[in-house]
């Protein structure tokens, strides 16, 4: 067992440290002549052409990866992306017409609600493109096209490196959809270039580990957390809160920063810290003003922001920096940080993050 963990105390820790490698593995062979390339999609490109709507179903962490895809594609094209949790999708009237594309995202490929959503969509004529880690899984077999994450086995119950792999595949797929539908431009080129260079930067992010552990020590005894973010920062806030809940059993909630004033800000006080996801993007100053409002309620604040941004220090001393990148790619750049923060709190509390209570790695029953 110890050998399997590669010298790390837990599988989860080892798997977070594998985030950069998971990113490499998801990208390998998928960029050709400076364009996104999926061999698997060769006969299916027509499906993604002239699509005015793409549906996405998934659960848990895979659902949040789907949300990033929605922000990405809707910010760069006129295509509508509807992302839904599988357990909801499968019991609603399916708004699917012949030839629609449904993207199913599942690490295990065995999540019962996602499989049933896919079966329902197929019955109504949808074509299924799935993003799966486990080769030969049920979802892989039942899909028209499978894009593999190639992250290798993930043992920890809480998804970590596979979240990184899901995001990588979804960015590439988003770029592919842009290319096929005439949206390819300089910005798309820039995003692809930055995506390809990101594994090295993720290594730099992982070097913040000792600092993140120190912060975890400082914050581990709080009983509540408010994660906030806007735009691409919002799915990161959601995933950060989920990681914390799953393995530390600390109550954490996530809100779009602009929604704070519609209720959740009433919760904040000296015992209710805010974890603010605020990279240098077009919404930075909007989020900053929400964080300042939180501070005026005496909430302790942790900021996850971009290196070199001096104005973060006006907010708090508890800052974790990541290197700058294109604004759409921050969910990927910030993934290791939210994972490590939750991991260290669980470890410092003496909990086993690999086997959180009441949770299963894949939920094969309803
Ligand atoms: C379980 C796991 C989560 C995972 C979710 C979806 O709840 O504990 O980590 O995100 O299932 O799993 P899937 O295999 O469909 O991605």
Image (tube, rainbow, N blue to C red):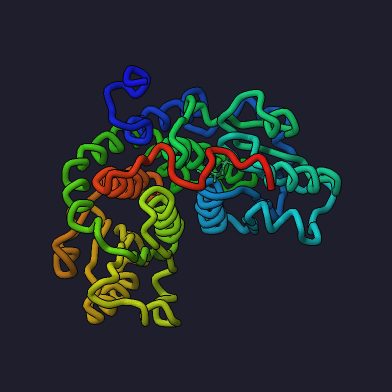
- How many numbered badges does the structure rendering display? 0
Say left or right for 126 vs 189. right
- Residue at (33% x, 30% y) in the render: 14
Identified at 28% across, 49% down, the residue is 345
* Residue 45 located left or right of residue 204: right
Kindly tell me whether residue 268 is visible in this rendering.
Answer: yes
Q: Percent x, y for residue 88?
A: 69, 58
Residue 51 spot, x, y in % from top left: 71, 50
Q: Quadrant of residue 109?
A: top right
In the displayed structure image, the side of residue 351 where residue 49 appears, left or right = right
User: Ligand 1, what quadrant?
Assistant: top right
**Front-lying residue, 114 or 287:** 114
What residue is drawn where x is 44% and y is 54%? 242
Residue at x 61%, y 48% (from the top left corner)? 58
Q: Determine the image quadrant of residue 46.
A: top right
Out of 230 and 350, give the one closest to the viewer: 350
Q: Is residue 325 visible?
A: no
The quarter of the rendered structure image containing the N terminus is top left
């Amino acid at each position: 067992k110890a050998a399997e963990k590669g010298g790390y105390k837990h599988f989860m820790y080892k798997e977070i440290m594998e985030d950069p490698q998971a990113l490499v593995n998801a990208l390998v062979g998928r960029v050709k002549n400076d364009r996104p390339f999926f061999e698997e999609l060769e006969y299916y490109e027509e499906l993604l052409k002239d699509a005015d709507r793409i549906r996405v179903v998934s659960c848990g962490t895979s659902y949040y990866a789907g949300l990033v895809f929605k922000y990405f594609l809707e910010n760069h094209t006129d295509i509508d992306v509807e992302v839904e949790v599988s357990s909801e999708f499968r019991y609603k009237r399916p708004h699917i017409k012949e030839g629609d594309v449904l993207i199913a995202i599942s690490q295990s490929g065995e999540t019962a609600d996602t499989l049933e959503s896919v079966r329902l969509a197929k019955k109504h004529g949808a074509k299924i493109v799935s993003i799966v880690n486990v080769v030969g899984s049920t979802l892989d077999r039942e899909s028209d096209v499978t894009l593999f994450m190639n992250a290798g086995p993930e043992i920890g119950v809480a998804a970590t490196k596979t979240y990184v792999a899901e995001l990588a595949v979804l960015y590439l797929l988003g770029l592919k959809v842009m290319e096929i539908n005439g949206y390819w431009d300089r910005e798309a080129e820039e995003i692809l270039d930055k995506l390809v260079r990101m594994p090295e930067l993720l290594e730099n992010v992982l070097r913040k580990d000792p600092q993140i552990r120190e912060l975890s020590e400082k914050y581990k005894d709080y009983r509540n957390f408010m994660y906030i973010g806007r735009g691409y920062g919002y799915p990161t806030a959601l995933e950060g809160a989920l990681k914390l809940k799953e393995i530390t059993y600390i109550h954490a909630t996530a809100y779009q920063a602009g929604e704070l004033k519609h209720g959740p800000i009433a919760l904040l006080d000296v015992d209710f810290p805010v974890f603010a996801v605020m990279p240098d993007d077009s919404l930075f100053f909007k989020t900053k003003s929400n964080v300042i409002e939180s501070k005026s309620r005496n909430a302790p604040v942790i900021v996850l922001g971009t290196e070199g941004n001096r104005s973060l220090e006006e907010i708090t001393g508890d800052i974790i920096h990541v290197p700058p990148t294109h604004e759409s790619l921050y969910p990927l750049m910030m993934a290791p940080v939210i994972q490590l923060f939750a991991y260290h709190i669980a470890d410092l509390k003496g909990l086993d993050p690999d086997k959180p209570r009441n949770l299963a790695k894949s939920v094969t029953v309803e």
